[in-house]
Amino acid sequence: MQLGRVDGLDAAELHPGRAHGTDRDFSLPMNRFSLIPLVGGLWGTVACGHGEAGSAAASSRGGGGVDLAGGIVVARLAADPEVQRADSLVRAGRPWRASALLAPRLRAPGSASPELRLAGARAAAAWDGWTEVERILRGADWLDRRFGGEGRELLARGDLERGQDGVVD
């Protein structure tokens, strides 16, 4: 039997006008029609993220931004550059560096500003430093009134993570 022949016919005789070899898997109509769901999905994602209802919900919770990783509203912190830098480090996935940056100012948490204390607690929570979260936030009188209760939430999460009962101050 000769290569390239089937039942005595050449491949050129079986498929006149076609080149030898395999056909392309993707044709132009297939590519065009597969882009429609992709473009529609992207449009829907963007449209849902930019509505008036979404921005109104964020502003009604104290002017916070949305934490894209957790899908929750996060309170914006003060204009203190060191607090903003630490918050930025936490969002960039470097919470230990943020904790080290704020540590000198959080040696005596009771004398620190609420913004500084919350930034330190966020950083410690990001590296599972729940005893540090408790040290920074315990006894703060603003936990339920400021930042949408985020400080109280961090304390409660810390208690749960360490297997302790949450106790109200």
Image (cartoon, rainbow, N blue to C red):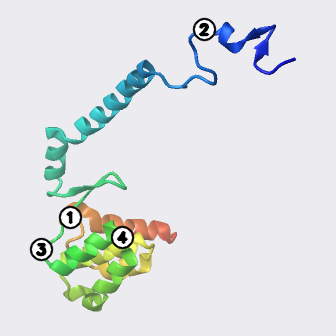
Quote the CA–CA distance across marks 2 and 3.
75 Å
Q: Dot 1: within a 10 Å radius of its alpha carbon, few (fewer than 14), some, or many (20 or more) residues?
A: many
The earlier-in-sequence mark between 1 and 4 is: 1
Residue 120's spot in the image, x, y percent? 30, 78
Going by the numbered disc 2, the residue's amino acid type is: Pro
Residue 21's spot in the image, x, y percent? 64, 24
The earlier-in-sequence mark between 2 and 4 is: 2
Residue 128's spot in the image, x, y percent? 45, 72
Proximity of marks 1 and 4: CB atoms separated by less than 8 Å: no
Residue at 73% from the left image edge and 12% from the top image edge: 10
Task: Provide the residue designation for mark 2.
Answer: 16
The earlier-in-sequence mark between 4 and 3 is: 3
The answer to whether residue 147 is above or below residue 1 is below
The answer to whether residue 118 is above or below residue 31 is below
Q: Indicate the secondary structure of the residue bearing disc 2.
A: loop
Residue 115 is drawn in which quadrant?
Answer: bottom left
Residue 64's spot in the image, x, y percent? 19, 58
Task: Provide the residue designation for mark 4.
Answer: 155
| Residue 78, disc | none
Front in this rendered view, residue 163 or 62: 62
Q: Dot 3: within a 10 Å radius of its alpha carbon, few (fewer than 14), some, or many (20 or more) residues?
A: few
Residue at 43% from the left image edge and 80% from the top image edge: 131
Q: Nearer the viewer, mark 2 or mark 1?
A: 2
Quote the CA–CA distance across marks 3 and 1.
15 Å
The earlier-in-sequence mark between 2 and 3 is: 2
Q: Dot 2: within a 10 Å radius of its alpha carbon, few (fewer than 14), some, or many (20 or more) residues?
A: few
Task: Provide the residue designation for mark 3.
Answer: 79
The answer to whether residue 36 is above or below residue 157 is above
Proximity of marks 3 and 1: CB atoms separated by less than 8 Å: no
Proximity of marks 2 and 1: CB atoms separated by less than 8 Å: no
